[in-house]
């Protein structure tokens, strides 16, 4: 898929060792523009993500009361709960919709793990859904703690209420079995059809929606009422896009539709289309955020092009030659155009973005030199800074192979974020499959506004997820 299109479906490619990712030192800027576009949502796009993270924190409270397990952190406990939930889904009649992580690594499992095994770093993926929830949990006031450090979190009264609302009458079954699991007990097998076993598994499974009306209503209230006024207004404006009427002349004007259909029916260009209901400041942040994302994407394509020039032989190439060969000049030209537009028309509040786009004022050799310096993993500079050398993650495409950039956390390349564990913990295996965890099939082959933050699409998907059980028409 062209990097200009799409809101946020995962691309393929996870490695079992060092991730092959180019962040170019722009992670803070990327996060800032995503937050301006869709405040307080992180990469959450369905309600069960928040529930599983909170349930993991509840389980961590049990762990801390169990003397021999006190060294196990909240992060590891929450990851174990999420792994268990995804494992049950994978081993059942799953209705995935992109909501499951770890299909490859968990698919190899033959039995439900003991807690002491599930909590090991090599049991589950290194990019769990929990990593995308720290900011939303804090922003929506579902937890108390130190900033966005998951290990410092405890459930707020609102978070406790949300978990109870999600579980409903299943609360005792779920909490008792998790407690027994943490203390060394066994959990229901994959194929058990006993009523309470099925109730337990379905309460956890991410591919089962939040079943309780009260839970969805409470979460919607959090989204509408918690956080700064500007953030609330921006979230609500995006949510309203999920139920916009069709344009007159396409179908009867009283027919409602999803935002994905709406985009397919109107002209999807920044020059001719403005999202309805978005105020001027919000629209400006979304639009110029897209200019920044597209400038970054053009820079990444320039680096990809240089890598192709070097080929399987990993031959160093002088900067002066690299900027003239292949499609590198076109990508550098596109980067310069987008970067200068960003600088000239937008007073960016983000210094990293401004510094990066200032490169657009330099010549091609200077631009490429700085991009390679910022990379430093796939490509690197020679000692005299006149040549491009293969880095320790260099991988030249095979002849005829189309190069696909691989992402750090698994979030779509338009998100471009690099997540680090809050306490420095690392995991032993990365997801090596095509999990689609940042959206569903709604947007896979529908053209979108180029460069738009994937959080915009995630907000619409979240609103649609909540509307399903609230009985609202979307």
Image (cartoon, rainbow, N blue to C red):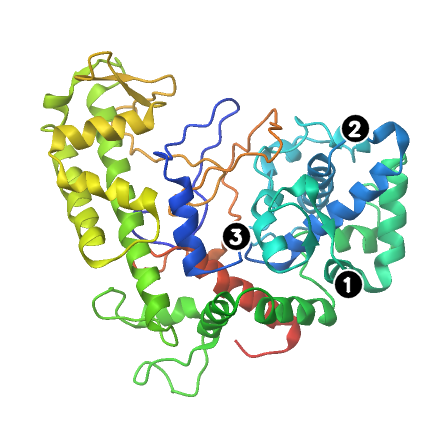
Label 3: which secondary element: loop
Where in the figure is residue 304, as x and y percent of width and height?
A: 26, 31
Residue designated by label 1:
161
Label 1, label 3: how far apart the Cα atoms are: 22 Å
Residue drawn at the location 74% of the way across and 57% of the way down: 156
- Give the side of residue 182 with respect to residue 244, left or right: right
Label 2, label 3: how far apart the Cα atoms are: 29 Å
Residue drawn at the location 38% of the way across and 87% of the way down: 253
How many marks the image carries: the answer is 3
Q: Earlier in the sequence, mark 2 or mark 3?
A: 3
Residue designated by label 2:
71
**Local crowd size for mark 1, using a 10 Å CA cut-off: few (<14), some (14–19), many (≥20):** some
**Local crowd size for mark 2, using a 10 Å CA cut-off: few (<14), some (14–19), many (≥20):** few
Q: Is residue 452 above or below residue 387?
A: below
Where in the figure is residue 473, as x and y percent of width and height?
A: 55, 79
Label 1: which secondary element: helix
Q: Earlier in the sequence, mark 2 or mark 1?
A: 2
- Report whether residue 95 is seen: no
Residue drawn at the location 34% of the way across and 23% of the way down: 376
Where in the figure is residue 222, as x and y percent of width and height?
A: 63, 67
**Residue 101 numbered mark, or none:** none
Where in the figure is residue 358, as x and y percent of width and height?
A: 21, 42
Label 2: which secondary element: loop
**Residue 42 numbered mark, or none:** 3
Label 2, label 1: how far apart the Cα atoms are: 28 Å
Q: Is residue 16 above or below residue 213?
A: above
- Give the side of residue 196 with respect to residue 124, left or right: right
């Amino acid at each position: 898929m062209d990097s200009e299109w799409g809101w946020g479906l995962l691309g393929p490619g996870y490695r079992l060792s060092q991730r092959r990712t180019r962040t170019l030192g722009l992670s803070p800027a990327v996060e800032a523009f995503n937050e301006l576009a869709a405040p307080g949502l992180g990469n959450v796009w369905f309600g069960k993500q928040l529930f599983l993270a909170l349930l993991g924190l509840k389980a961590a409270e049990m762990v801390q009361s169990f003397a021999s397990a006190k060294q196990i952190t909240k992060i590891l406990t929450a990851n174990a709960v999420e792994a268990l939930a995804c494992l049950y889904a994978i081993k059942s009649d799953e209705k995935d919709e992109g909501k499951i992580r770890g299909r490859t690594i968990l698919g190899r499992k033959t039995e439900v793990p003991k807690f002491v095994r599930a909590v090991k770093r090599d049991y589950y993926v290194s990019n769990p859904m929990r990593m995308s929830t720290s900011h939303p949990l804090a922003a929506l006031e579902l937890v108390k703690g130190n900033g966005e450090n998951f290990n410092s979190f405890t459930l707020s009264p609102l978070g406790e209420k949300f978990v109870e609302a999600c579980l409903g009458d299943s609360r005792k079954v779920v909490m008792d079995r998790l407690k027994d699991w943490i203390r060394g007990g066994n959990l229901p097998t994959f194929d058990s059809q006993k009523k309470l076993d099925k109730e337990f598994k379905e309460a956890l499974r991410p591919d089962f929606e939040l079943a309780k009306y009260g839970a969805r209503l409470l979460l919607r209230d959090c989204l509408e009422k918690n956080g700064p006024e500007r953030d609330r207004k921006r979230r609500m404006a995006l949510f309203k896009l999920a139920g916009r009427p069709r344009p007159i002349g396409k179908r009867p004007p009283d027919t409602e539709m999803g935002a994905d259909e709406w985009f397919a029916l109107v002209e999807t260009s920044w020059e001719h289309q403005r999202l309805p209901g978005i105020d001027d400041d919000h629209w400006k942040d979304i639009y110029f955020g897209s200019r920044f994302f597209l400038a970054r994407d053009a820079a990444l394509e320039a680096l990809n092009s240089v890598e192709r020039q070097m080929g399987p032989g990993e031959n160093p190439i002088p900067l002066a030659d690299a900027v003239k060969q292949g499609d590198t000049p076109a990508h550098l030209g596109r980067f310069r155009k987008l970067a200068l537009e960003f600088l000239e028309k937008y007073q960016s509040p983000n210094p990293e973005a401004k510094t990066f786009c200032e490169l657009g004022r330099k010549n091609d050799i200077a631009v490429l030199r700085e991009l390679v310096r910022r990379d430093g993993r796939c490509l690197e500079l020679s000692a005299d800074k006149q040549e491009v050398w293969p880095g320790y993650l260099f991988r030249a495409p095979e002849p005829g192979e189309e190069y696909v950039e691989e992402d750090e956390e698994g979030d779509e390349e338009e998100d471009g974020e690099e997540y680090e564990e809050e306490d420095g913990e690392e995991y032993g295996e990365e997801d090596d499959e095509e999990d689609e965890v940042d959206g569903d099939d709604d947007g896979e082959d529908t053209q979108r506004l180029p460069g738009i933050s994937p959080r915009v699409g995630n907000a619409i998907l979240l609103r649609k997820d909540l509307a399903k059980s609230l009985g609202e028409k979307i």
